Image (cartoon, grey):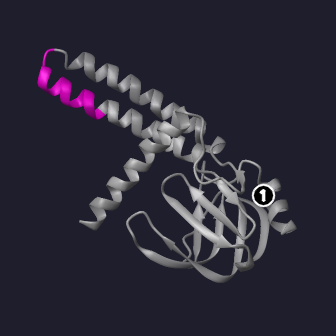
């Protein structure tokens, strides 16, 4: 039951993000400096949404003589389009946020990790396009790459979408302006 609850909560966050995106608002950025990461995924996700719309029209045309199947698949297809647009919206309205005492690293509605600034041992601009799974590393990949690497003096706990907890000592993330993020972190 917990997994179903977590998935439903995740989907609700996507649709809330869609509403915030339409209202041109962000979430959780008050009192801090925001660093976006949505540009790296925007073209891909909006292209996927376009393909979903084309598929919706095609399936609707093919099933025009089967009203029940047409209606069911229309609902599923419209939901899919909104879901994909919601993924992009979540990236736009939930940027990384640097406050006076912590860096809030986010990845859409999937991840939200608060890293105390005192725990950051090293920060560097590092573009990586291949990521081998490591037990103590968290890779928040956007557009098949990460651009900033954080090495932590003490581990922080990351909770996955389905509730699995694990300590991480290295966080790799994508930022639209990695130089500005690295400079801001180095200054603190």
Q: Is 68 a magenta residue?
A: yes
Q: Residue at x 82, y 55 (%)?
A: 179
Residue 125's spot in the image, x, y percent? 79, 61
- The 10 Å Cα crowd at callout 1, few under 14, some 14 to 19, many 20 or more, is many
**Total label count?**
1
**Which stretch is magenta?**
65-76
Q: Is 145 a magenta residue?
A: no
As displayed, is residue 137 above or below residue 107? below
Q: Residue at x 82, y 61 (%)?
A: 184
Quadrant of the drawing holding the N terminus: bottom left
Q: Residue at x 72, y 48 (%)?
A: 176
Instruction: In this rendered view, identify the residue nearer to me: 124 or 36.
Output: 36
Please give the residue where the numbered disc 1 appears in the rendered image: 181
Instruction: In this rendered view, identify the residue nearer to me: 123 or 8.
Output: 8
Instruction: In this rendered view, identify the residue nearer to me: 133 or 174.
Output: 174
Q: Residue at x 68, y 57 (%)?
A: 97
Quarter occupied by residue 156 = bottom right
- What's the magenta bit mostly, secondary-structure-wise? helix
Residue 43's spot in the image, x, y percent? 59, 35
């Amino acid at each position: 039951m917990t997994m179903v609850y977590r998935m439903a909560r995740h989907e609700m966050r996507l649709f809330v993000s869609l509403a915030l995106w339409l209202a041109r608002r962000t979430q959780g950025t008050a009192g801090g400096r925001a660093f976006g990461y949505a540009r790296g995924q925007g073209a891909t996700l909006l292209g996927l949404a376009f393909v979903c719309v084309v598929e919706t029209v095609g399936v609707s045309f093919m099933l025009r003589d089967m009203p029940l199947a047409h209606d069911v698949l229309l609902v599923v297809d419209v939901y899919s389009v909104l879901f994909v647009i919601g993924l992009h919206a979540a990236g736009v309205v939930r940027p990384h946020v640097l406050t006076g005492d912590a860096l809030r690293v986010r990845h859409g509605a999937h991840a939200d990790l608060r890293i105390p600034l005192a725990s950051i041992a090293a920060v560097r601009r590092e573009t990586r396009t291949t990521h081998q799974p490591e037990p103590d590393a968290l890779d928040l990949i956007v557009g098949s790459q990460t651009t900033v690497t954080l090495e932590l003096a003490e581990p922080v706990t990351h909770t996955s979408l389905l509730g699995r907890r694990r300590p991480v000592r290295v966080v790799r993330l994508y930022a639209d302006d990695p130089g500005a993020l690295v400079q801001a972190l180095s200054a603190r």
